Amino acid sequence: MKTKLGFAILCVALPLLAHHSFELKFDRHRPLALTGVVTKIEWVNPHTQFYVDVKDESGKVVSWTFETAPPSALIMRGWQKDSMKVGDTITIHAYGAKDGTNFAAARQVMFGDGRTVFGGSMEDKGPPE
C-alpha cells in the first residue's frame, strides 16, 4: 500500500518540478513594449515561441525571442495557428528576461489589423486591464 501511495505522489510531483516558474526566468519589473517584424514561429509544447526583428533606438535591427503559453492555451485565448505569420509587423507587451538577454515572456500581442490577444500565463497575473 505504501509503495502505491509513494508512486502516486511521485507521479504527481515530477511534472510539477519539471515546469519552470515565470519568476525564475522573467522579471515582472522589466516590462517591455516592442514593435517589429515576425521572422519565425514555433507553435510547439511546452511553450510557443516566436522571433521578431526590432529596430533599437539607433536603428540597428535586434532579434528578440518571445515565449508564450502552450498552443492549447493560446487557442482558448483566441489565437489560431495562422494568427501570426512570418513578415507580420506586431507590437508585443512582454516581461524581459532576468539575465538581460533579448528573451521575453509575451503577455499581449497586437496584430497589424488592431486585434489584440493575450499570450501570457496566469503566473504573470493574467491579461492586462
Image (cartoon, grey):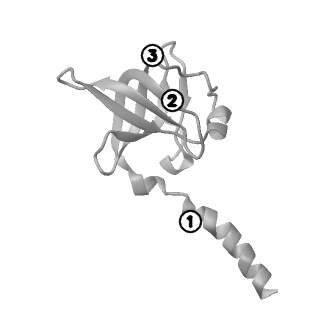
Residue 58 - label: none
* Residue 11 position within the rendered picture, expressed as x and y whole percent measured from the top left: 70, 69
Q: Nearer the viewer, residue 104 or 123?
A: 104
Query: What's the distance in space between the residues labelled 3 and 1, CA to CA?
Result: 37 Å
Residue 81 falls left or right of residue 54 = right
- Residue matched to label 2: 41
Q: Secondary structure at mark 3?
A: loop
Alpha-carbon neighbours of circle 1 within 10 Å: few (<14), some, or many (≥20)?
few
Alpha-carbon neighbours of circle 3 within 10 Å: few (<14), some, or many (≥20)?
few
Q: Secondary structure at mark 2?
A: strand
* Residue 79 position within the rendered picture, expressed as x and y whole percent measured from the top left: 62, 28
Q: Residue at x 22, y 23 (%)?
A: 60
Which amino acid type corresponds to the residue marked 1 in the rendered image? Leu
Q: Residue furthest right?
A: 1
Cβ atoms at labels 2 and 1 below 8 Å apart: no
Q: Residue at x 39, y 27 (%)?
A: 52
